[in-house]
Image (spheres, rainbow, N blue to C red):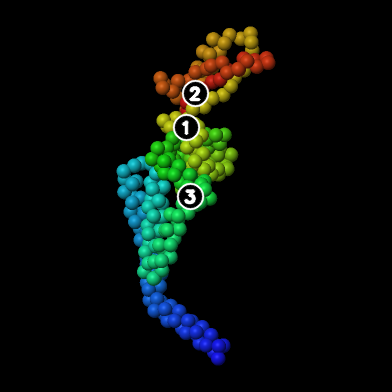
Amino acid sequence: MDDNSALSKLKDSLMEHWNDFIYQVPNIIIAILIVAFGFLLSNSVALFFKKIIASKTQDPLMTNFLSKTIKLGLIILVVLFALNVAGLGGIATGVLTAAGASAVVIGFAFKDIGENFIAGVILSFNRPFNLNDTVKIDDIFGKVKAMQFRYTKLKTFDGRDVYIPNSDIIKKAVYNYTEDGYFRLDFVVGIDYDDEIDIAKQVIPDAVIKSEGVINTETHECFVTVDSLGVSTVNLKVLFSD
C-alpha cells in the first residue's frame, strides 16, 4: 500500500510538472522568437549607432568599440526579457542578485577581464594612437590594426599579430611614431676619433635631406647628435622624418 501511494505521488508530481511545462510551451516559443529577433535587432541598432558615431568622429577604433558595446548591452537586455516572458523571471532575478552578491568574488576571479574592459573604454575616448599608427608599446613595435574589449591588436613589421591587453597600454609608455602623419626614423653612423665631429654633423644631414621622401622642416628637422663613444669610433645618431 505504501509503494502504491509513493508511485501515485510520483505520478501526480510528474503530471503536474508536465502540465506546467505544456502550459509554458507557448511562452517558451515566444521567448525563443524574442531572442532571435533581439539578436537581429541588436545588430541593426548597433549598425545604426555605428553610422551615427562614424559621422561624428573620424576615429574607426572608437566607432567599432562603442558599437560593439551597444550590441552587447542590447543582447543582455533581450535575454533577460526573454527569460521573464518564458516564466523564468526568477532565474533572471536570481542571476542579477547573485551577480550583485558575488561581485567581489567575481571581481577577483575576472579581475583581468574587467580591468581590460574598463581600460578599453578609457582608450576609446582618450587614446595615444589611431588606426594604422606605427607605435611601440613596451618592446613591441608595429602598426595598430584593431581594438577589442580586452586587447589591442598590433601587426609587427616581421608579420606577427600581437594582442596587447588594454590594461597594459594604460600602464605602460606608448611611443607613437606617426601621430602627426610623419614617421620618425634614426640610424647610427660611426666616425673615426680623428674626424671632425662638427663637419660630420653638417655633411650627414645634407646627404640625408637629399634622399627621396625625407622631410626637413622646422618641426621635422633632420639633425645629428653624438650617441655614444665606441672602442674605435664616435657613434653619431641621425634622426629624420619620412
Nearer the N terminus, badge 3 or badge 2?
3
Q: Can you identify the residue that label 2 sits on?
A: 240
The secondary structure type at the circle numbered 1 is strand
Q: Can you identify the residue that label 1 sits on?
A: 176
Q: Residue furthest front?
A: 2
Residue mark closest to the camera, 2 vs 1: 1
Circles 2 and 1, Cβ within 8 Å, touching? The answer is no
Q: Residue at 61% across / 9% down in the picture?
A: 195
Q: Give the number of callouts.
A: 3
Residue mark closest to the camera, 3 vs 1: 3
What amino acid type should be assigned to the residue bearing mark 1? Asn
Nearer the observer, 51 or 151: 151
Quarter of the image for residue 38 reads bottom left
Q: Report crowding for label 3: few under 14, some 14 to 19, many 20 or more residues within 10 A (C-alpha).
A: few
Quarter of the image for residue 197 reads top right
79 with respect to 197 (left or right): left
The secondary structure type at the circle numbered 2 is strand
7 with respect to 127 (left or right): right
Horizontal and vertical percent position of residue 185: 52, 27
What amino acid type should be assigned to the residue bearing mark 3? Val
Residue 177 visible in the current orientation: yes
13 with respect to 51 (left or right): right
